Image: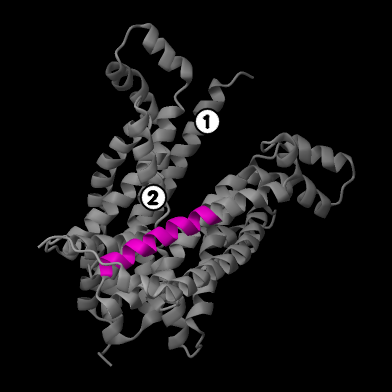
Amino acid sequence: MGGSLNANHLLFLGHGALWTIGLSTIALIGGGLLGFLIALARVSPSRAIRLLSGGYVQLIQGTPLLVIMFLGYFGLSALGFSISALMAASASLTIYVGAYFGEIWRGCIQSVPKPQWEAAEGLGLSRTQRMIKVILPQAMRIATPPTVGFMVQIIKNTSLASVVGFVELARAGQIINNSLFEPFLIYAIIAVIYFALCFPISALSRRLERRMGNGRTKLMPA
Amino acid sequence: MGLNLDFSVVLERWPLFWDGAVMTLKLAALAIVFGAIIGTFCAVGRNSGNRLIARACTLYVEAIRNTPLLVQIFLVYFGLASIGFKFSAFSVAATALAINVGAYTAEIMRAGFESIPTGQIEAAEGLALSRFQIYWHVILLPATEKVYPALTSQFVLLMLASSVTSQISAEELTAVANYIQSDTYRAFETYILVAIAYVVLSLVLRAGFWALGFALFPRRRRLGTAL
């Protein structure tokens, strides 16, 4: 139909891949900031804040990202904002990633051993001091492997931004396929590019996990 | 221009939503059953002494876990069609989802296998249990019991991910929503209702798995906790 795969097509795919990376970065930063707030809210001394943030996490984790994408896209325009696909996708991914990071990091904060909290309290540190100086530095160490692991999920999930018309890697592949109709070839290339983006991060996350595991076994009594 | 929500025209079409939800559950159930089987065999394969089989299983797990479900579905659906195999959207969707969740299950099961102390396997060998008996009673069942919570969260995520199959027009909940919003021009309302439906479905699924856990693992029933 539209000829065969040429350098221009590959350039277009490369452009899509760059947008996949860009959107992943936006989601990582936005979702990271939101997730941090959620994680703090989840261990807040106020019951209302805990319930509210817990409800948010439950709600988002019970909804598919695809539906959140549509809600972001149609919802924001129903509210009267005229928005681009990039904005809708960024907002949806931020909301989604924030809930997952919030839950992951809550677990990390709570897995800092109880005596550390008590010792900090015993030293007369205020709540903020205790969090910043004692708990968070240790929680961050625990949080590194799962956070890196979740980055793979973020990259893969940006493919769903294609449904609101944002031209990232998956959408770029669809567009090229519509003109060439070589689905096997094109989607295989897309899959390989995604693999090349994700696999190093998965491998890194696994390595970090193993190192953490070793550290922990060393601390355990024989 | 303020927000003006009108749910009535969307709610009128509730039988469509119902059919979509049933279809979503059917897809998820098929994918979970076959995915669990694929994943368990794959975890056993990676554990086996045969290097070729272990390599093949690792390749499968890594390939699936590092590519988006959307691309996998497109590859299977349009790829098979282009070389002359024509299957219904539903069967392609169920197959792709099963292959997808199989890889995640394999990874979780492997963690379960690794948690079994070597001493228990040696003890079973000392008791002259056959290889199959050891696998079944000493490795597989206790390992599944240990990773059951992780497995069920993965399965709930799969049910949510099945929404992606709407992109090849398998007629599940999200595809129904796409149809209804184009019919009523009430996109926001439609997707709000669908989001609520998914939250309810995931709660139902969680409750179901919790009850199933009690039925499957008698120890959980007796002790009130896993292991």
Please, is residue B41 above or below residue B133 in the view? below
**Residue A113 coordinates in the image, percent (x, y):** 47, 21
Q: Would you place residue B7 above or below residue B44 in this image? A: below
Look at the picture and state if A139 lies above or below A55.
above
**Which quadrant of the rendered structure holds the C terminus of chain A?**
top right
Q: Crowdedness of circle 2 by 10 Å Cα count: few (<14), some, many (20+)?
A: some
> What residue is pinned by disc 1?
A214
Callout 1: chain: A
Q: Nearer the viewer, residue B68 or B52?
A: B68
Q: Is residue B189 magenta?
A: yes
The residues bearing labels 1 and 2 have C-alpha atoms spaced at a distance of 36 Å
Mark 1 or mark 2, which has the lower sequence index?
2
Q: Residues within 10 Å of mark 1 (few under 14, many from 20)?
A: few
Tell me which amino acid carries mark 2: Leu
Q: Main secondary structure of the magenta part?
A: helix
Q: Identify the residue shown where x is 34% and y is 24%.
A: A137
| A178 vs B22, nearest the viewer | B22
Q: Secondary structure at mark 1?
A: helix
Asked whether the residues under the numbered discs 1 and 2 touch, taking CB atoms below 8 Å apart as contact, a structural biologist would say: no
Q: Which residues are magenta?
A: B187-204
Q: Amino acid at mark 1?
A: Asn
Residue displayed at 29% across by 84% down? A178
Q: Which corner quadrant of the image does residue A124 belong to?
A: top left
Whether residue A201 is visible: no
Q: Identify the residue position indicated by label 2 in the image.
A: A59
